[in-house]
Image (cartoon, rainbow, N blue to C red):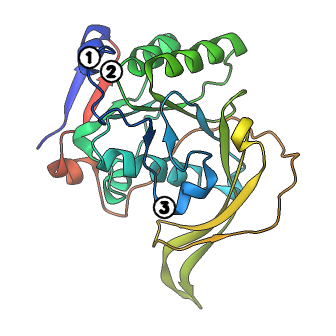
Amino acid sequence: MAGHMVVGSAALAGLVRPASAPDPAGGHRVLPVAPELTGLLPNRGLRRGSTVAVAAGQPRHSGGASLVLALLAEASRGGSWCAVVGVPTFGAGAAAELGIALDRLALVPNPGPEWATVIAALLDGVDVVVTAVPASVSASVANRLAARARQRGSVLVPYGRWEGADVTLQVVRGAWEGLGPGRGRLRRREVTVSARGRGAAARPKEIKVWLPGDELTRVIPRTVASAVDRPAAGRLRPVASPGRTVAGVSRRGALTLVGPA
């Protein structure tokens, strides 16, 4: 099924389900995540109304984009709608390979100067909203969007620096597997993911997990240092498999794109 472009704020309003509509997830307050990631989240999933940030990290610790996709996969497979905002280079092929349903995925590659308005509109009716964080976001705007997510029962997933998140995840170390002496292919990456937050997530945690995953998780028993350097703002750049294009995956489902009017 071919993807289609939705243009303008009116079309965006028509895309999301009304906030008063029945919960498509059956009223469940926690959306599922991959078993490998449950130990990082205080509710062992994405609690509706929460803000779960993914820190961009440093280039040498890249892997945050794959972590974002891994967070979305189980909820998407379970029937939830997801949206990704501000990521013109989003890898639809990588998303499909991880199990994200493209027919329930809305993309807003370039939200323009009305970024906060776009996020607020999506939070009114989309279950999980991922957004690349602009270079400068005031605390008041961040607080208003987090409050909107709580009110509407959506999950806000900022990718980049975000103050006041319920929990912040970050890839802090990683090593690729698959290359041999002079030959081979990169197949998967073992990454160490840290979690810190407030309330039930106040105690820092770390796990090691494969991305893409193979259901192998090893929890590191030691407590990590509570002082973690603030990550620099970054951009979400998932990469599809070699030779895979958006057109090549469009047969799996309709990919909804939302552009400026």
Where does residue 123 sit, x and y in percent of width and height?
Answer: 43, 21
As drawn, is 26 to the left or to the right of 160? left
The quarter of the rendered structure image containing the N terminus is top left
Q: Residue at x 50, y 41 (%)?
A: 46
Q: Earlier in the sequence, mark 2 or mark 3?
A: 3
Q: How far apart are marks 2 and 3 (CA)?
A: 34 Å
Which corner quadrant of the image does residue 135 belong to? top right
* Gap between marks 1 and 2 measured at Cα: 5 Å
Mark 1 in CB contact with mark 2 (< 8 angstroms): yes
Of callouts 1 and 2, the N-terminal one = 1
Q: Is residue 94 left or right of residue 163?
A: left
Disc number placed over residue 153 in the picture, else none: none
Identify whether 169 is placed above or below 184: above
User: Between 222 and 102, which is closer to the camera in this rendering?
Assistant: 222
Q: Residue 7 carries which label?
A: 1
Image quadrant occupied by the C terminus: top left
Residue at 66% across / 63% down in the picture?
A: 207
Circle nearer the viewer, 1 or 3 = 3
Q: What's the amino acid at mark 1?
A: Val
Q: Position of residue 245 (x, y in %)?
A: 28, 52
Q: For the residue marked with disc 3, what is the amino acid?
A: Pro
Q: Which mark is residue 35?
A: 3
**Whether residue 245 is situated above or below residue 24 in the rendered picture:** below
Residue linked to disc 2: 259
Can residue 84 be seen from the camera position used here? Answer: yes
Mark 1, other Cα within 10 Å: few <14 / some 14–19 / many ≥20: some
Mark 2: amino acid = Gly
Residue with the most extreme left position: 1
